[in-house]
Image (spheres, rainbow, N blue to C red):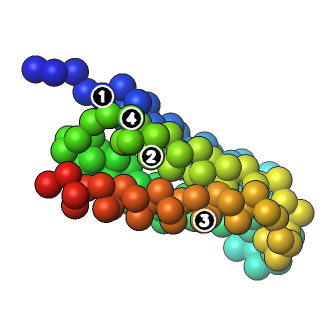
Amino acid sequence: MTPPPTIPVVCVALLGLLVFVLGANVTRHRAIRGATGNQAPSDPADRMFIAQRAHGNASEYVPTLAVLIVVCATLTDGWWLDALAIAATSFRWLHAVALLTSRSMAAHVPLRDVGALGTYATGIALAVTAVVAL
């Protein structure tokens, strides 16, 4: 039995870690607010709102990226897959950091745009790689 490819496995693990770290951050904000605080804020500058959106956004993209990385790793190997896995993981982490460090969800943050566009590009490239590798 051949060992699993190291880089895709590490990238999937880092993507999973991102979702759980962001979830723990939301829990931290909920604990700070307590039972009587607003647990569902809508103000784009509210730190809990930003934390919730960072977690929600990661939860929307990470599962699909992780599945695509695993599927591609079972169909092919090499530098292309490694580069895509590293890029997808990096863009997701960059997007989360850009969200969490912004003053408001309404503020334009160029790094957030880079993270989002990079996620789209690498996700599409992984999907195409999966089909082409069949």
Q: Is residue 63 above or below residue 85?
A: below
Secondary structure at numbered mark 1: loop
Q: Position of residue 112 (x, y in %)?
A: 72, 61
Q: Is residue 18 left or right of residue 5?
A: right
Amino acid carrying label 3: it is: Leu
- Check disc 3 and report the residue beneath it: 117
Give the left or right position of residue 13, taking residue 43 as reference.
left
Q: Quadrant of residue 47?
A: bottom right
Dot 2 corresponds to which residue? 84
Residue lying at 60% horizontally and 65% vertically, measured from the top left: 117
| Residue 82 in view here | yes
**Residue at 82%, 76% in the rendered image:** 106
Tag nearer the camera, 3 or 4: 4
Residue 14 x, y percent position in the rendering = 50, 37
**Quadrant of the rendered image containing residue 34:** bottom right
Residue 41 drawn at (x, y percent): 76, 74
In the image, is residue 97 above or below residue 99?
above
Q: Nearer the viewer, residue 5 or 19?
A: 5
Query: Of helix, strand and loop, which one carries label 3?
Result: helix
The crowding category of the residue bearing disc 4, from other C-alpha atoms within 10 Å (few below 14, some 14 to 19, many at least 20), is few
- Observer-nearest residue: 115 or 76? 76
Nearer the N terminus, badge 3 or badge 2?
2
Which quarter of the image is occupied by the C terminus? bottom left
Horizontal arrangement in the rendering, residue 88 relative to residue 134 (left or right): right
Q: Which residue is mark 4?
A: 79
Residue carrying label 1: 5
Tell me which numbered mark, 1 or 4, is placed earlier along the sequence. 1
**Mark 2 or mark 4: whose residue is earlier in sequence:** 4
Cα distance in 3D space between marks 3 and 4: 22 Å
For the residue carrying disc 1, how many other residues have a C-alpha within 10 Å: few (<14), some (14-19), or many (20+)?
Answer: some
Q: Amino acid at mark 4?
A: Trp
